[in-house]
Each structure stands twice: as C-alpha cells, then as structure tokens.
Image (cartoon, helix red, strand yellow):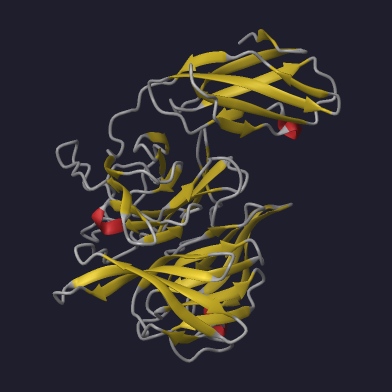
Amino acid sequence: MPGEVVLGDVCSFTVDHEQSNRNTVQEVEWTTDFANVTRARIEFGLAGGELGMTAPVDLEELDEPTYLVGMKADRDYAFRIVAESEAGTCTSSELSFTTGSLPDGLPLITKAVSKPGASQGFIVTTPGVDPDFAGQARDLPSAYIFDTDGDLVWWIDEVVFDAVHAQLSWDAKHVWFFSRNSAQPDFWNVVEAPWHGIFFYPEGVGFAPYDFAVFPNDGVAAPHPEVSTDPPSYVELRSTEFGRGYFVLSDLSELYDAEEGGFRPTAVRYQPEDDTVTFGDSLLGGFIKVTHAGDLVWQLGGSSPKGDSFALEGIEQWADNNGYHLTSDGRLLFFNNTSVGAGGDPASRVVELQLDEENWTATKTWEYQDDAMYSADLGDVQRLPNGNVLITYSMLGVMREVTPSGEIVQEFDNSHSFATRAGRGWALFGYAEFRTSLYGPPLR
C-alpha cells in the first residue's frame, strides 16, 4: 500500500503498517529523510497511554518489516519511530491502529491470584502433553504467548502432538517449539516459526523425543536418539552454506551412566555466560553440564559420575526432575516431580541448590512445596528478575509466582476443559519461559 508521510520533530518518515496474519501483530515498514541513521526503534503501547514497549529495528534488513508483538486483541494502539544518528535523534509523530479479535479455540487462561509485587511481562509456553498419555492431538496451538494479565498475545495455528517446549530465538524473530510424541515420527519435531508463518526443521533430521535449547546463532542443542540409537547423542542443529543440518558432538554415554530404564534427558538449557549446555535427566535424578562442543564439565546428583561432581548438603538424593534454571551466580533451581506430601501422597516441589565449584558442594538454600500440587510429568521453574520464582505445574495447568517466603503473588489457571468445544481436550502447560520483553535474549 502507498506509504503515509509522517512528520517528525526534525525530519519526516514514510510509513506503511498493516495487521499481520496474527491479529495481535502489526507489521511496520518505513523510510526517512533523516541522514545516516545508525540506530532505530519503534516505541508502541495502548493508545492514549505510555508507549512502554520497544521493538528494535534491524537496519540491515529494512526491506523486511519490523513486527510489533506482545499486544492484546481488540485494543487501540499507537506507535512512533525513533531514528538516531551522530547528528542527533528524530522522532515521528504517533500513528494508531486497532488489533484484531482472537480466533476461537485458543487456551482460556484465568488469572486466579494477583497481588502487589508480581512480575509484569510475558510467558512463552505450549499446551503440554495429553493428560491421559494417549498421544492424541488436542486441536490446540502448538505454542503461544500470554501476558501477565492472562491475555494471549501470540499463537501458532498448527497443531502437533504433545508440544512440550517453546522458546524465542535470541533475536526474538522466531519461535522454536517441540513435540516429543513418538506416535508421529514423520513430524519434524524442532520447528522454527516466524511471527507471521511456520516452517519445519529440515526433513531427515528425524525424531527427538526429549527437549532442546536455542543458541544465540539460532543453532539448536538437543539429545537425539536417531543419530545414535543406543545411546542417544548430543547434537547441534545449525545452518551451514549447504542448508540446515545436524552435527554429533558426543554420545550421552560418554558423559554419564544411564540408570535403569536408560537415558531420559527431559530438559535441556543453554548457559550464555560460559557457553555451556546442561541436561536434566529424570531417570538419573540429576544434571549434566557440558561445553558447547560436548565435553563433560560436571555432574550433579545421580550416581557413578564420570568426572567432577558435587556432594549434596542439606538434601538427600532425589528421583524424577524435569524443568530447571541454572542461574549465572551458580544457583540451580529444579522441579522435583515426585516428592512426598505430609499425608504420604505424592507432591511436587521446587528445590534450590547453591553450587560451589571450588569445594564441589551443592547446598540446599530454598525449597517450596504445596502438598496439593502434583505434576507427574514436565513441570518447570524459573528465577525471576525480582527474586521471585515462577513454578509451572504442567499437568495441573497452573503457574504460580511465589516469593522467597513462599507467598503466592500471581497464579494462572489453564486447566479448563475444552470437551464441549469441538472435543478439544485439556489445555494444560508445557515448559514455560518468562520474559520481561518479547525482544532480545532470553532471561535464562
């Protein structure tokens, strides 16, 4: 469409903007007569209010639109363009638009608890696994994002079985999501979805029923059974001059011994501060840290370590861990699926360990358990910037933000049955990633 000329304070802009095929996403393209622009951004927010969200502009890809994401449906918004050069800054006047409506069939998230001190931002997640473990598609989006008001701001229309994890790429231009269901081996499991569309990871990569982590260069770390079926391999999927492909870095048996039942590395995380990858193995009851290249760094928990390992202090060896967060200051928080409640029934807990790599001790510093909360599968935890902890009880469809004292300051409920809505089944949660912004690197 023809561009609209918009005056700035010391320059002018020509701007095109339109709604993406996601009704809550706006695409913006622009040019300016402001000379020698070195940096630019688009500030946006609800019309009539503070334009408190910021989308960075990639000046090397000005032929591609900048996507404004994180907005609610059926609301009036405004934006302005800010261009910078060595000579100064030029800011456009505001332009307005209205977001579209949400389609039917998206998860219905209820904000069950809201108290002062709760974090404000966005949560990237999935509908989790079939609660009957029957491997049935539930006609729900494979990945979606909601804000801390409980409002959906982005989603993928496509449906895959048991979508358990979704992450934004480091440049926040793509969403990676993953299904671990073995009933559909021809479904490529690590999927990269641009904000305005979707495509699958390269055919021939095969089936990866565990988890993945995204590197800053958009490579993907994953334990991968079909590259080396017994034991699984740690591989990196990345782009090359010949296209995307996978590279075997090590077999898991080189890193740790399998427990009875084999290897089950159900959670994978990347640590940018030292360019390492960690695996949480639910059968091991522990965690393995490796370099980006696949060399063993240490083992936490489990038995018979092959290298450096930690002595547990203040906690006995546990069984069954899934989601976790290793912070830059050496604290590891993990979701322990199967603990024991006061009445002897199973309950899930979150444990924090302080890791000392000089004395090789792992000391329990914090624990949270509600005996009424039990997630037999998945479950996740993340230390938030305000010091609170986000806990995801995946199989209950509940997320909680709790303070260090254990007070619940925010809770989201996604356990509503969709049985009366075209047989949609249960909408629960997979792993979850909290972000203060949908732009830039992740918080963990």
Question: In the shown orientation, is residue 412 left or right of residue 41?
Answer: left
Q: Image quadrant of residue 368?
A: bottom left
Q: Is residue 348 above or below residue 137?
A: below
Q: How many marks?
A: 0
Q: Image quadrant of residue 93?
A: top right
Q: Is residue 388 above or below residue 175?
A: below
Which one is in front, 64 or 38? 38
Determine the residue positioned at 28% across, 52% down: 398
Determine the residue positioned at 68% across, 31% down: 57
Which one is in front, 91 or 289? 91
Image coords of residue 105 (percent x, y): 28, 34
Image coords of residue 16 (percent x, y): 62, 15
Determine the residue positioned at 40% across, 46% down: 117
Which part of the image, by quadrant, shows the N terminus?
Answer: top right
The answer to whether residue 177 shows anywhere in this view is: no
The answer to whether residue 323 shows anywhere in this view is: yes
Which part of the image, by quadrant, shows the C terminus?
Answer: bottom right
Q: Is residue 318 above or below residue 306?
A: above
Determine the residue positioned at 20% across, 44% down: 416
Image coords of residue 261 (percent x, y): 35, 82
Image coords of residue 225 (percent x, y): 48, 71
Q: Which residue ends up furthest to the bottom in the rendered image? A: 304
